[in-house]
Amino acid sequence: MAALIYLRVSTDEQAEEGYSLQAQERACRLFCELQEHQVAGVWRDEGYSGARADRPGLQQVLANVRAGDLVLVHKLDRFSRSTRLLLDACERLELAGARLVSVSEMIDFSTPIGRVMLSLLGAFAQYYGYS
């Protein structure tokens, strides 16, 4: 399976502490190695809010995804801080025959309970993004 890795930090502080692009990429690449997925590309958005849909890296990932692909993120809040954007992007991935995978949360978002968790985690990401 091909994996498209998406990385994001919104502030310089995040880039240096905990959620650095390098740390996110390491976690995603380790996941690919353990699951025997081929990395098809890595896209980064540095200094962009997760609530914005117009992030260049995100738009490139969504444009490049194909059936059977995985879009890997370190944590769901790195993908989106907007519940609406998250659900719209997941629907777009689903229509393309791809799926979103968070290597930290490890929830199958294609199951009924996984969809509930996706909405819940998306709502928390949005809440914490605005607090």
Image: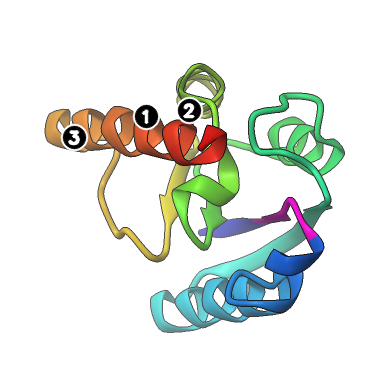
Q: Earlier in the sequence, mark 1 or mark 3?
A: 3
- Total marks shown come to 3
Q: Main secondary structure of the magenta part?
A: strand
On residue 90, the disc is 2
**Amino acid type assigned to the residue bearing label 2 in the image:** Cys
**Amino acid type assigned to the residue bearing label 1 in the image:** Ala
Q: Earlier in the sequence, mark 2 or mark 3?
A: 2
- Label 1–label 3 contact, CB within 8 A: no
In what element is the residue under mark 2?
Answer: helix
On residue 111, the disc is 3
Characterize the local packing of mark 3: few (<14), some (14-19) or many (20 or more) Cα atoms within 10 angstroms. few
In what element is the residue under mark 3?
Answer: loop
Please tell me whether mark 1 or mark 3 is closer to you in this view: 1
Which residue occupies 72% across, 27% down?
52
Towards the viewer: 54 or 70:
54
In what element is the residue under mark 1?
Answer: helix
Residue corresponding to mark 1: 123
Q: In 3D space, how far apart are the residues under numbered discs 2 and 3 (Cα atoms)?
A: 13 Å
Towards the viewer: 55 or 107:
55
- Label 1–label 2 contact, CB within 8 A: no
Q: Is residue 10 left or right of residue 95?
A: right
Q: Which residues are magenta?
A: 6-11
Location of residue 18 with respect to 52 vertically, above or below: below
The percent coordinates of residue 77 (x first, y second) are: 50, 47
Q: Is residue 58 left or right of residue 30?
A: right
Towards the viewer: 82 or 105:
82
Q: In 3D space, how far apart are the residues under numbered discs 1 and 2 (Cα atoms)?
A: 14 Å
Which residue occupies 13% across, 34% down?
113
7 within the magenta span: yes
